Structure formats: C-alpha cells, structure tokens
Image (cartoon, rainbow, N blue to C red):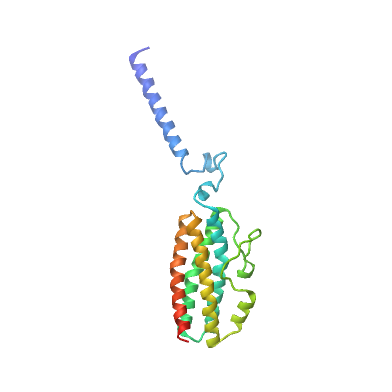
Amino acid sequence: MSTRTLARRAALAGVALTTASALTACGGGHSTEGGHGRPAAGTAPAASVSAGVAPADVMFAQMMIPHHQQAVRMSELAGNRAADPEVTRLAEQIRAAQAPEIATMTGWLTAWGRPVPSGGPADGHLPGMDHGMPGMMSDADLARLEGATGRDFDRRFLTLMIAHHEGAITMARQELADGRHAGARAMAQQIVTTQQGEIDTMRKILARR
C-alpha cells in the first residue's frame, strides 16, 4: 500500500472521528428531537422543561393561583365600594401586580405538564390537594365584603387583605425554602417584598381610622 493511500485513509478516519464527537456533543445536551423533527427514542418530551422543577415549585403555583384570584376579586370590589381613595389606589395596585402573576404561573404549570386550577378561588382546589391555603377568605367573608360599602367596606377590605397577604407571604417563604425553579423563587421573593410593604401601608390606613 502506497504512502499516499495510507495518508488519505488516515485523513478520512480523522474526519469521521471529529464528526462523531460533534454529534455526541450535540445529542448529549438539551435537544429532545431525533431525525425529521420527531422526539428522540426514549426521551420524555417534558424532561428538559421539568429538569429544574421541584414538587414545591408545582405546589407553589397550584396554590398561589387561586390565592391570587381571590385577591384580584377583592380588589375589583373596591372600585365602586371603597370610600377612601387610598384604599382604591391600593386595590388597583394589588390587582395590577397579581393578575399578571396568575398568567405566569399558569404558563409554568402548562409547560411542566401539571394540572392548572380552574374556575374561581372557591373552586380552584385540585383533586388530591389537601393542603390549606393560609389567608384565604371563607365564602361568608366574601359575601360580607361584597355587601359592604363606604367606610365599612374599607375596614373589612383592609383587615381581610392583611390576613390574605400574610398567608401569601407564608406560602412564598415555603417556596424559597424548598423550591428550585428560578422563576418561581424570584416570584416568591417578589411576593414577600411587595406584599409586606402593602401590609405596612394597610396597617397605617387602619390606624388613622
């Protein structure tokens, strides 16, 4: 065999080895697709999405969605019932902050392939979820708030929302302790910071009455 033939075969072998190494590097990372756009054999489609998700992250989103829905409902009532302009402004601030968070958490649960609570706060409970949500109003509390107006509404709203926020902070701190998902943990920290500030404001409004 000539020297030229040996050199040519060695070059071809080097190209093959380089190509195989490149394919291995690409296939061993985050891709979940095989040839022609199909999932690679033996790969769960949601595996890469759920890799950084802990059970605490799922529970945080599933519980916080109906919790936020109730806060949004309470805040909407203030529009035509509150007497104090500061209560009206605070209620709008709460609604503006929490409605987008509901949408974000719904998107997470959908991406993770986990059940999303449906309906309003009263029926947002998921089958098999036996965990209570701290700070949630009872149906009777909500009915009394809906029936109140003026200064009576303001007092009830502030008292109930303080307890509601305290419950949300408890849930958020649990996520910070046990969660892994970066987005969920960031939201939990934001809830702690924002809602503690709102609690302080609501207590000041109540104190001057």
Q: Is residue 184 visible?
A: no
Where is residue 61? Give x, y as percent.
Answer: 54, 60
Where is residue 120? Give x, y as percent.
Answer: 61, 69
Point out the image quarter for the N terminus: top left
Where is residue 29? Give x, y as percent.
Answer: 46, 41
Relative placement, left or right, of 15 versus 71 is: left
Residue sitting farthest toward the right: 127
Residue at horizontal 35%, vertical 13%? Answer: 2
Res 131 quadrant in image: bottom right
* Total numbered labels placed on residues in the image: 0
Residue at horizontal 54%, vertical 56%? Answer: 56
Relative placement, left or right, of 6 versus 24 is: left
Above or below residue 43? Residue 203 is: below
Residue sitting farthest toward the front: 207
Above or below residue 86? Residue 26 is: above
Where is residue 35? Give x, y as percent.
Answer: 52, 39
The residue nearer to you, when weighing 53 against 102, is 53
Q: Is residue 122 visible?
A: yes
The residue nearer to you, when weighing 92 against 35, is 92
Residue sitting farthest toward the left: 3
The residue nearer to you, when weighing 166 against 74, is 166
The residue nearer to you, when weighing 6 against 184, is 184
Above or below residue 176? Residue 165 is: below
Residue at horizontal 46%, vertical 82%? Answer: 205
Above or below residue 205? Residue 53 is: above
Res 109 quadrant in image: bottom right
